[in-house]
Image (cartoon, rainbow, N blue to C red):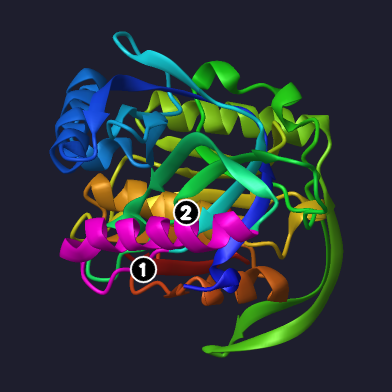
């Protein structure tokens, strides 16, 4: 590891809900999966249903190797305890084990390097709190994770970077006021169109600029998504919503292979910073955990929007949804294999 794999960021306070128990250096390899299973049981589902989730350790006692372990997520539920990740400066590490079975040793090696080499030469000291955010990226053949360590010490110049928190939204949160700091504005000059069976770029200048009426309709649509079993993820920076995406629960297609990504948007002032990609990863993880084989997207045809979808790995849908084509005839019908 090197300095290029340590990222300093200022993170806002975040509230988590989960379960905690005493743990120890010698038992944490057993304690984390056991506590995770208890957390899933309280939430009433299996592991894939509650991703992303946090593993938090705090109050480590070096003399004994004991600490407090917490496993939880961002959604409150009966039987779960409250945990606060305080606002402050965090050091985020990059961990990419070659195999999933090497996950534990890879995290341990990264933390040893951080505590024995990077931290002593820095102007910081550890605040005795660290966490790992687990998503669909932490499983599979090529897992990755970014453990974070809370820091304290004298104030130094830190590159201005705001932590983006991706979390599932609840129906009670959905209101026009939630979008007070979100700006849906896009000036379009060119769009993709299918002409004589071939895709081509055509001039089509227009401006999209949502007002209260559009946000009210959006709230109704997102509420319907949640009430019908789907999911809505929000991207928050310093407590302000700056992006969101939604996935419907009802499968469709000739083999019921599709779950629909009904929307994905990033505020105009936050584009180009990876928020869209993070939202797409959250949507993919949820869809895969709920039996989807592909995401179906009736996508905005602007050159800029299509460039994003292609960068995410989307391609033209093998099966077109007649309902979507009739509703939005100028959209590009895309799919993304999960």
Q: Position of residue 76 (x, y in %)?
A: 42, 17
Residue 281, given in percent of the width and then of the height, sits at 44, 57
Of badges 2 and 1, nearer the viewer stands 2
Instruction: Give the residue displayed 49% in from the left and 34% down from the top.
Output: 128
Residue span colored magenta: 95-121
Q: State left or right for residue 80 relative to residue 163.
A: left
User: x and y percent of residue 337 in the render?
Assistant: 33, 68
Q: Does residue 315 appear anywhere in the picture? A: yes
Q: Tell me: residue 9, above or below residue 32.
A: below
Q: Nearer the viewer, residue 221 or 108?
A: 108
Between 53 and 248, the one lying in front of the other is 53
Determine the residue positioned at 13% across, 38% down: 30
Dot 1 corresponds to which residue? 96
Give x and y (percent) for residue 20.
Answer: 30, 21
Q: Which mark is residue 235?
A: none
Q: CA distance from mark 2 to mark 1?
A: 18 Å
Q: Which mark is residue 115?
A: 2
Q: Which of 214 and 180 lies nearest the eye of the viewer?
A: 180
Q: Tell which of 4 and 292 is nearer to you.
A: 4
* Residue 114 falls within the magenta-colored stretch: yes
Q: Main secondary structure of the magenta part?
A: helix
């Amino acid at each position: 590891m090197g300095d290029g794999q340590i990222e300093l960021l200022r993170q806002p306070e975040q509230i988590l809900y989960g379960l905690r128990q005493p743990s120890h250096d010698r038992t944490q390899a057993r304690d984390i999966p056991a506590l995770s299973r208890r957390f899933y049981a309280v939430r009433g589902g299996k592991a894939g249903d509650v991703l992303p989730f946090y593993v938090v350790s705090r109050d480590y006692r070096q003399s004994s190797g004991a600490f407090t372990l917490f496993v939880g997520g961002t959604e409150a539920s009966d039987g779960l305890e409250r945990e606060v990740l305080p606002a402050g400066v965090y050091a985020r590490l990059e961990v990419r084990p070659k195999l999933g079975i090497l996950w534990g040793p890879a995290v341990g090696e990264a933390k040893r390097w951080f505590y024995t080499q990077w931290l002593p030469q820095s102007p910081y000291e550890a605040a005795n709190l660290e966490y790992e955010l687990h998503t669909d990226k932490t499983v599979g053949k090529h897992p990755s994770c970014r453990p974070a360590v809370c820091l304290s010490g004298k104030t130094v110049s830190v590159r201005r970077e705001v932590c983006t928190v991706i979390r599932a939204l609840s129906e009670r949160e959905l209101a026009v006021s939630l979008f007070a700091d979100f700006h849906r504005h896009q000036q379009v000059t060119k769009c993709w169109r299918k002409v004589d069976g071939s895709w081509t770029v055509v001039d089509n200048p227009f401006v999209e600029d949502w007002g209260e009426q559009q946000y009210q309709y959006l709230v109704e649509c997102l509420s319907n998504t949640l009430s019908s079993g789907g999911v809505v993820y929000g991207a928050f920076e310093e407590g302000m919503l700056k992006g969101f995406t939604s996935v419907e629960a009802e499968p469709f297609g000739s083999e019921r292979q599709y779950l629909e990504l009904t929307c994905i948007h990033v505020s105009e002032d936050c584009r180009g910073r990876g928020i869209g990609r993070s939202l797409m990863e959250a949507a993919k993880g949820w869809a895969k955990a709920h039996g989807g084989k592909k995401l179906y997207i009736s996508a905005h045809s602007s050159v800029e929007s299509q460039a994003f979808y292609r960068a995410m790995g989307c391609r033209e849908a093998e099966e077109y949804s007649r309902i979507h084509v009739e509703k939005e005839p100028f959209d590009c019908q895309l799919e993304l294999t999960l």
